Image (cartoon, rainbow, N blue to C red):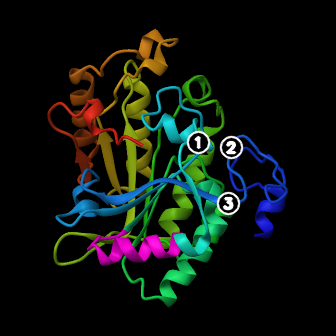
Amino acid sequence: MKKLEKCNLCPRNCGINRINGQIGFCGAGANVKIARSSLHFWEEPCLSGKNGSGTVFFSYCTLKCVFCQNHKISNGGKGNEITVQQLADIFMELQNEGANNINLVTPTHYVPQIIEALKKARDMGLNIPIVYNSSGYEKIETIKMLEGYVDVYLPDFKYFSEEYSNKYSKASDYSEYARSAIDEMVRQVGAPIFDENGIMLKGVIVRHLMLPGLLLDSKKVVEYIYKMYTNSVYISIMNQYTPLDIVGDYPEINRRLNPRHYNKVIDYAIDLGVENAFIQEGDTASESFIPDF
């Protein structure tokens, strides 16, 4: 795990030695730590399908989003340390349970260990698609390490404006890195490919969670993705923002998303010519959608 001896896996570029016990911005150590592994039925339909997506939630995160619905694990570090072999075994268990894919949730800071676990799992018979489910705050060098291991990239594109990314995620350079990372992801896996049941086997889905008051920023994100990639990627426009107690210091986002703003972004996407998109209907903004870790 040479990469962990001077960890620069993410744009924070901490340069610390995780093998010797040093801890950087994300909080992760040398060993993989996970909070949950299970079949998940609330991802995009082409990922969950009827059988569910085999999700593995990794502890810690390279962002510090003030509104994070998984803050217990991203900031609190809740979870259990496991070996690379145990991670490979979990992948196999999920496949044996009928998962459509292995869905790596917030995996950036464990990429070297994940690659080793995937190698072991392949030797054990792992043959379902691998989904890299990330915040979008990625370095190209780290994404390049994953070529040949990841089939579906599922990055967020949270903000276009550095003002918002700095204020809400402590990452003023978020948009710059997200755009470069998505470009590399598209280069690797190409246009979407689905099986006979509509499950995605290859491709990129860019998620955008709308935040209250950021209508213009959301439009910029949708416009950028469409103008760059037209319909060769899917855009998932999400209305499930849930104001938790942790956003009390940010009154402007301590409220539900205005449904009219969400509809305006959908209309804007249609006017641009977006055809490949997922949207959410009804009231998805509920703590019942948030896994209890």
On the question of residue 282 being in view, the answer is yes
| Residue type, label 1 | Gly
Choose between 225 and 278: the one closer to the eye: 278
Within 10 Å of the Cα at label 3, are there few (<14), some (14-19), or many (20+) other Cα atoms? some
Q: Are marks 3 and 2 in contact (CB under 8 Å)?
A: no
**Residue 77: mark:** 1
Query: 211 or 179, which is in the foreground?
Result: 211
Would you say residue 148 is visible in this rendering?
no
Q: Which residues are magenta?
A: 87-101
Cα gap from disc 1 to disc 3, whole angstroms:
13 Å
Which secondary structure type mostly characterizes the magenta part of the structure? helix
Q: What residue would you read off at disc 3?
A: 31
Q: Position of residue 128 (x, y in %)?
A: 36, 78
Judged left or right of residue 24, residue 71 is: left
As drawn, the label of residue 27 is 2
Specify the amino acid type for callout 2.
Answer: Gly
In the rendered image, residue 96 lying in the magenta stretch gets the answer yes
